[in-house]
Image (cartoon, coloured by chain):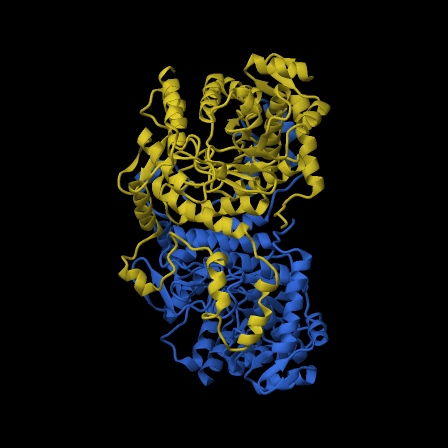
Chain colours: A yellow, B blue
């Protein structure tokens, strides 16, 4: 299939050339001395905390990152191929609040975290169980990262995400992965089993915490999303071309660092750039400008032969209403159409990244299912063209009771869980429910009946012991 | 820009070849003798009511339809270019019911029709005021078509759609257009001022009413959407490739007829094919299969060098909820991404084509605005790349108070009418409203303050007199 493109090759090269200019002349701010040392060794000029990247250095290092890698799960059936054509879904990440129709909005707790891990494991559309599914505010800061990972491991056998709480968070993540996969850290290098998201500090910087994490994961050769959220009008120019230059400079600088630490470390060109709502001076994520940046991100990543990441089911709405629906579908479908390969956040995120919604999580799962069906495309062959069948039925006939229909409809059609397709009267008799009401019943039923996949008792004990010692 | 494509050139040719086979060997059923006569003269073999189309005849006639035309409005500012790159929005069409949050669902009346004509005229995103915006059930059948057109003419100076109530409906439409444009029907031929939607009777047929309309409009050289709604699993095979063959055969047959009646008549390759919800045996329009057919339709139309039409903001939901939002955005955005040129239905349609919703109309207008902003793309030039500005601001700075930001944000950013982007507390203080509540207030305010564009008194009188005589 051909992906949606908004830039010509010349325009992509203009953005690339502008980025190289910024990297060489304006530089990127790094607050972490070990990163500055590695960059200096690699050929960057350092002035104070700012690194200036010669053109050749950038172009050489970027080429070293692979275009494809496998992310391993403890259940091999859930291993994932991350490349430039596949599309992988990961649920919402990082919200401090949660909300549901019954209890309203509140600070997230470990219970909420566990619930989302269960919902994500249960979903056939989420490929990764999650990272910071919601901030467990009731857990002490020092062990929060380990408790979250343990919850993912206990409730799911899909791949999960590592902590980015600096060097310490990354080290704990790697050690816990080694326990889970019952191997040493050297073996883990050959079998990437953790993926993490490391973000720049826009404009044109990285902080200690992220740099520690980037370097630690690179040493262990674990895949990373090197991600930028440049906000047009506040942390970047109000013009989206300029915003993409800022984003691109940050991401390329981060990727250069990973390759200098360990050549061939798998990275994903990752972004969630959007624009400012100028009335409030705040970030908006459900805007068409966000969607345009998604396509720009996909095109830039493809230019560098790297897999790409963008946001998916994200919205500025406070409730799972029509706005929540159209903003989430816009960002998810534009990601799919543009050839984005890794979608974070695929389900639950609302209120401009501040909140995870239980009902929205279920509705977004439906969007994920719909978009995965769209990605399956239309098969064209003798059987699907069905000329003989059409000839038999002829003008004015119908296909409802034909064997060909019975054989095909289950696989050919997507079968919704949330969307109502009954007639008006049946819908009214059934309680005239909105999508959010249906979603509420669905998530409650899943949580009430959830059974976690098996985990070896000895590995479980080792993990618990590791956490106790933190 | 590059459109989304799901078929290779070979696959499109497979569908084309299969279509030619169906047209030649299975044939199309026409219940209207004048159409059969024209087709026979053009080289089709006729057997009873079935016409069989030789390959060469189809390929020759299809080529005669133009790839571009202008649709004239009584206000020249609202003239529209219909071609293979532009995208034009027309609101919902044909629903027998209307609904709003206050009064609930009911049979549509002339008052509803007029309200939707006003909302459509007011909208900066609807390019055509409408056709059958909602069925005015309180108006006698014989004059209903004329009353609807008169309402469009009175309430808007945008282009509007003609009646397809057979020969009579088309003739009245053409005469009223001649009155409105104060010209004879010969002049009208050079200035297409009406567009109509003529639909096949799937599978593989056309009825009297549509054939009368197609031929009358073709004689007057007025543009037409030749449209098919093939339903996978009931009126077409459950496999979408086969569904597209049925759709394609019907549309090509209709287009051949238009060109035989009058060479060069402007046509749009139009479809709204979708699939059956097998649980109920009913049509669903918010499905991913619908979205896939939209891309297929765009690719087929481009193969024939014709502008294309697909549905837009359409949903199976009964209410303006999250489902309504995600289904409408899916179909509208996939139309835009695939290079569809004429969107019918752009606003208001819900409940699988059965109902027009006032609140959904306003929400869909927001979707139209968002998608039009996406279509504007990202401009790349020295000013928008903003290298000097980025250099001045440097790492760690901000762009909020910069002159470049003030100069650009109004044009660069879409400014929503429905979407809420405030923070949670402000939203709560403002009444914790869902999108549908905001939409309700918006449509009421527009209707309360509506002022129609001026219409010459003499033309108005002539139109009224014409209708009185019907």
Q: Residue at x 61, y 78 (%)?
A: B27
**Considering the image in quadrants, where does the C terminus of chain A appear?**
top left
Q: Is residue A249 above or below residue A440?
A: above
Q: x, y (%) of residue B327?
A: 45, 54
Q: Is residue B193 visible?
A: no
User: Taking A440 as reference, is A170 left or right?
Assistant: right
Q: Residue B154, relative to residue A237: is it above or below?
A: below
| Residue B133, picture quadrant | bottom left
- For the residue pair A48 and A77, the one nearer the viewer reads as A77
User: In this view of the protein, which residue sits in the foreground, B36 or B47?
Assistant: B47
Report x, y in % for residue B92: 46, 63
x, y percentage for residue B8? 66, 55
Locate residue A378, reporting x and y percent: 57, 57
Residue B407 seen by the camera = yes
Asked if residue B145 lies left or right of residue A355, the reply is right
In front here: A265 or B153?
Answer: A265
Residue A133 falls left or right of residue B156: left
Q: Residue at x 35, y 54 (%)?
A: B440
Residue visible at 45% across and 71% down? A401
How many discs appear? 0
């Amino acid at each position: 299939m051909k992906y949606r493109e908004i830039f010509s090759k010349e325009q992509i090269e203009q953005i690339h050339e502008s980025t190289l200019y910024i990297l060489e002349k304006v530089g990127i701010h790094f607050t972490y001395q070990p990163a500055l040392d590695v960059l200096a060794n690699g050929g960057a000029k350092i002035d104070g905390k700012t690194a200036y990247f010669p053109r050749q250095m950038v172009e050489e290092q970027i080429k070293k990152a692979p275009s494809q890698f496998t992310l391993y799960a403890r259940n091999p059936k859930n291993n994932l191929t991350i490349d430039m054509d596949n599309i992988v879904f990961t649920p919402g990440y990082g919200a401090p609040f949660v909300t549901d129709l019954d209890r309203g909005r509140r600070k997230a707790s470990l219970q909420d975290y566990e619930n989302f891990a269960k919902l994500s494991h249960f979903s056939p559309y989420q490929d990764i169980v999650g990272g910071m599914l919601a901030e467990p505010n009731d857990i002490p800061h020092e062990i929060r990262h380990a408790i979250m990972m343990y919850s993912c491991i206990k409730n799911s056998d899909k791949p999960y995400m590592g902590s980015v709480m600096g060097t310490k968070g990354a080290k704990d993540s790697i050690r816990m992965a080694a326990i889970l996969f019952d191997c040493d850290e050297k073996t883990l290098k050959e079998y990437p089993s953790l993926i993490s998201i490391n973000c720049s500090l826009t404009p044109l910087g990285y902080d200690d915490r992220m740099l520690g994490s980037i370097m630690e994961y690179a040493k262990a050769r674990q895949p990373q999303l090197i991600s930028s959220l440049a906000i047009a009008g506040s942390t970047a120019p109000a013009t989206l071309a300029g915003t993409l230059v800022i984003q691109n400079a940050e991401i390329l600088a981060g990727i250069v660092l990973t390759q200098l630490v360990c050549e061939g470390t798998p990275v994903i060109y990752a972004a969630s750039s959007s624009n400012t709502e100028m009335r409030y001076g705040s970030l908006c994520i459900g805007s068409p400008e966000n969607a345009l940046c998604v396509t720009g991100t996909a095109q830039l990543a493809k230019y560098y032969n790297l897999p790409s990441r963008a946001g998916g089911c994200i919205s500025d709405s406070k409730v799972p209403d029509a706005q929540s629906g159209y903003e989430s579908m816009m960002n998810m479908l534009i990601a799919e159409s543009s050839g984005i390969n890794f979608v974070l956040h695929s389900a639950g995120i609302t209120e401009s990244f501040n909140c995870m919604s239980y009902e929205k999580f279920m509705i977004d799962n439906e969007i994920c299912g719909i978009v995965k069906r769209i990605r399956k495309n239309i098969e064209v062959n003798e059987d699907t063209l069905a000329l003989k069948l059409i000839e038999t039925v002829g003008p004015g006939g119908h296909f409802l009771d034909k064997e060909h229909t019975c054989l095909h409809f289950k696989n050919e059609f997507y079968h919704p869980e949330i969307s109502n397709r009954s007639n008006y009267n049946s819908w009214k008799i059934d309680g005239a429910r909105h999508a959010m009401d249906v979603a509420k019943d669905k998530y409650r039923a899943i949580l009430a009946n959830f059974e976690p996949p098996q985990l070896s008792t000895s590995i479980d004990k080792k993990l618990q012991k590791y956490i106790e010692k933190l």
